[in-house]
Image: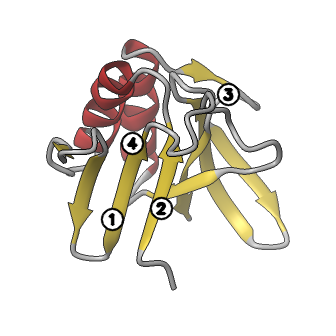
Amino acid sequence: MFSHIMVGANDIAASKAFYDATLGAIGVGPGHTDELGRVFYMTPTGIFAITPPINGEPACGANGGTVGFAMASAEQADAWHAAGVANGGTTCEDPPGVREGGHGKLYLAYLRDPAGNKLCALHRM
């Protein structure tokens, strides 16, 4: 459904270190910086990118927005979460764990990146 997801960042170096670690924990290589200072993470299924806002205003997390990353296992979600906390991210929502609801059992782990964007690691059990 998606070709790419791009989020804003005020400190590209801090955000790149965060995403290199969290995405590296799930097998994605380091991001590549282009001539405009944007950082791209390329995968066979899509692109994730960080950018300084093009309007010159400060980046901010979307109120009510969450970017979810698919995980192969609960252990991979935990590794993603640990890498994020160790690299400038902050835990948000409930601690990583199983949630049950209308979509069945899910293992979820939430973080905010250095720019305040809300992220989720999701493993469908």
Residue position marked by numbered label 2 in the rendering: 5
Give the residue at x 65% y 58%.
Answer: 106
For label 1, the SS is strand
Q: CA distance from mark 3 to mark 1?
A: 27 Å
For label 3, the SS is loop
The amino acid marked with disc number 2 is Ile
Which residue is nearer to you in this view: 56 or 119?
56
Q: CA distance from mark 3 to mark 2?
A: 25 Å
Task: Measuring from the top left, give residue 52's x and y in whole percent.
Answer: 45, 36
Give the residue at x 39% y 27%.
Answer: 15
Bin the neighbour count of mark 4 within 10 Å (Cα to Cα): few under 14, some 14-19, many 20 and up. few
> Mark 3 vs mark 2: which is more N-terminal?
2
The amino acid marked with disc number 1 is Ile
Which residue is nearer to you in this view: 3 or 69?
3
Q: CA distance from mark 2 to mark 4?
A: 24 Å
Give the residue at x 25% y 34%.
Answer: 20
Q: Is residue 97 left or right of residue 79?
A: right
The amino acid marked with disc number 4 is Glu
Residue position marked by numbered label 1 in the rendering: 47
Q: Residue furthest front?
A: 55
State yes or no: discs 1 and 2 in contact (Cβ < 8 Å): yes
Q: Which mark is residue 75?
A: 4
